[in-house]
Every structure is written in C-alpha cells, then in structure tokens.
Image (cartoon, rainbow, N blue to C red):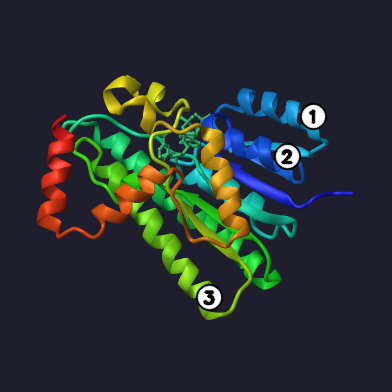
C-alpha cells in the first residue's frame, strides 16, 4: 500500500538528507536536488532500510526551468502531505564585490522556488484540509551580518512569507500546518560549499547537528509551531535582538560582523 508522500528539496546532503532519513520511516519520498547520483544512493538506502518508495528528481531550483519541473511534479499530487523547502546556499564577501549572478541565483532559489513550490503544494493541501510545509530559513532571518546581505534578506523573506501563510490558513480555519525552521550554525556541507572555515564562524558550542535541527522541526510540526529555532542559545539571541532598538541592534551586529 502506498504511504503519504513527503517532498524534500536539497535532499542530497546535510539537513535535507536527515529529513529524508527521518521521514522514510512512515512516508514515501520525493527527493529533489541537482546531484542525482547522491539522491539515488540515498534513495536506495532508504528503500532498503525502511521500505519507502523513493523517487528522485534532478532539478536546479535556481532556474525557472528547474522550478517548473518540480511544480509540475507536485501539482495535483494527492498523496503529498509534507513539502520541505530546504535547498539553499550561502555566499561570501561584500554585496557589491560578490558576483551578481550568485546573488541572483540565491534570490531565485530561496525566494522564487519557495514561493512557487508552496503555491503548488498548498492548492491541493488546502482543498484536502491536510498537510504541512516547512520552509528552512535561518537565524540569519533575524540577525543581520556584513558579508551576507542577500542571504539575510532572502531568509527574512522566507520567515515573513511563512508567517503570512500561517495567518491566511488560520483565517480559513485550515488544518494545514506551516513552519519556518530557523537553524543557527549547523554541521553540513553548507560551509564547505562556501569554502569558509567553521572555526572562523563560531565557537564549537554554537554548532548544531543536522539531526538536532530536523528533530526540533518534526517536534514543532506535531505541536503546530510556526517558528522553530533549534537550541536554547539561538532562541535567546533571537528573543533579545528582535526586542532591541534598531540603533543598538545595528551596533551589536556591526561588532559581530567585524570579528
Ligand atoms: N548549515 C548551516 O549552518 C545553516 C544554518 C541556517 C540555515 N541553513 C539552511 O539550511 C538549508 C540546508 O542547508 P545545509 O546546511 O543542509 O547545507 P548543504 O549540506 O550544503 O545542503 C544544501 C542542499 O541544497 C541543495 N541545493 C543547493 N543549491 C541548489 C539548487 N540550485 N537547486 C537545487 N538544490 C540545491 C544541495 O544539493 P545539490 O548541490 O545536489 O543541488 C544540498 O542538497 C539551506 O537552506 C541553508 O540556508 C543552514
């Protein structure tokens, strides 16, 4: 018998791959990323270990064609109960010094892909009055840093967009759940891809495992929590910084950026 379907973008490594492992226990999976070989290897393991039916979809979600491919696949998919918009990346350098093309790709991936996939999924979910969306934002949605202008801006967009969906769904008394997952520094391939040393980013006590992030998200889904910020120290930072007057917040952010 087929099981409910979970679609995960960026499932070829890090947080997305851990979501796939956790969800394979009781879901069939649609795994999406560019590295098809990685998706197939993971899918094979999950089919063998958990009996999940796993479909892989190669798509570059920083392109219109890639987004259209995934939208086409999930539109009208009656078994879709969970969509995780997780694919993402970071860049280095001051905004005007970093290549514009990378900034454009980031905006397309974090903003346009998230928006289009949420739209495709919510049409069916709201009609069935069942399902959930997780948009993987970041603590960077709340705490700005020099060298990450587009990253902070696009992750803030994800948080605000998810909050607005929450209000719209609540307004129609829908059972559909939405979550903005906001991790801090997490061990994955993210910083390797950026080619930055983890040591220069933060001390080891601030680093989370992808398993801890995913478990907090799944627990949050069960409790229908809108914002999930894994780790008490990150919850404290966000709670404090968002309450400060902007002049004081910017002074702290400038100091942290200089380090
Ligand atoms: N690690 C952290 O410290 C941290 C903190 C806060 C938030 N996050 C967020 O967490 C999410 C997952 O990141 P991660 O930490 O797990 O990093 P990761 O290990 O580098 O995984 C990123 C995933 O995104 C996929 N991806 C990147 N560009 C893509 C594209 N153009 N089209 C389709 N898929 C693409 C990658 O797959 P392919 O390369 O195979 O396409 C990979 O599966 C990201 O949204 C990131 O912003 C991470």
Residue at horizontal 68 percent and vertical 57 percent from the top: 81
Of callouts 1 and 3, the N-terminal one = 1
Q: Quadrant of residue 34?
A: top right
User: Mark 1 = which residue?
Assistant: 49
Q: Residues within 10 Å of mark 3 (few under 14, many from 20)?
A: few
Check whether the beta carbons of the residues at disc 2 and disc 1 lie within 8 A of each other: yes
Residue 67 at x, y percent in the picture:
52, 47
Residue 57 visible in the shown view: yes
Residue 187 lies left or right of residue 78; in this view the side is: left
User: Mark 3 = which residue?
Assistant: 170
Q: Cα distance, mark 2 to mark 3?
A: 29 Å
Q: Quadrant of residue 57?
A: top right
Q: Residues within 10 Å of mark 2 (few under 14, many from 20)?
A: many
Q: Depth check: 120 or 54 in front?
A: 54
Residue 147 lies left or right of residue 167; in this view the side is: left
In the structure shown, which secondary structural element does the residue marked by tag 1 occupy?
Answer: helix
């Amino acid at each position: 018998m087929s099981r409910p379907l979970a679609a995960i973008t960026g499932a070829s490594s890090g947080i997305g791959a851990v979501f796939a492992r956790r969800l394979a226990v009781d879901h069939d999976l649609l795994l999406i990323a560019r590295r098809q070989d990685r998706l197939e290897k993971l899918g094979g393991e999950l089919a063998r270990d958990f009996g999940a039916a796993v479909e892989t979809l190669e798509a570059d979600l920083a392109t219109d064609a890639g987004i259209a491919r995934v939208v086409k696949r999930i539109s009208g998919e009656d078994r879709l109960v969970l969509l995780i918009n997780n694919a993402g990346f970071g860049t280095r350098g001051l905004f005007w010094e970093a290549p514009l093309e990378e900034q454009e790709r980031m905006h397309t991936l974090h903003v346009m892909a998230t928006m289009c996939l949420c739209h495709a999924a919510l049409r069916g979910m709201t009609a069935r009055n069942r399902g959930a969306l997780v948009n993987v934002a970041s603590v960077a949605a709340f705490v700005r840093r020099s060298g990450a202008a587009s990253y902070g801006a696009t992750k803030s967009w994800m948080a605000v967009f998810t909050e607005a969906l929450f209000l719209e769904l609540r307004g129609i008394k829908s059972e559909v759940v939405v979550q903005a997952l906001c991790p801090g520094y997490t061990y994955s391939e993210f910083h390797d891809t950026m080619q930055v040393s983890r040591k220069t980013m933060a001390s080891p006590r601030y680093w989370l495992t992808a398993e801890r992030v995913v478990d907090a998200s799944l627990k949050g889904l069960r409790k229908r929590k809108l914002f999930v910020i894994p780790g008490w120290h990150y919850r404290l930072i966000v709670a404090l910084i968002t309450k400060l007057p902007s002049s004081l917040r910017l002074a702290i952010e400038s100091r942290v950026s200089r380090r």
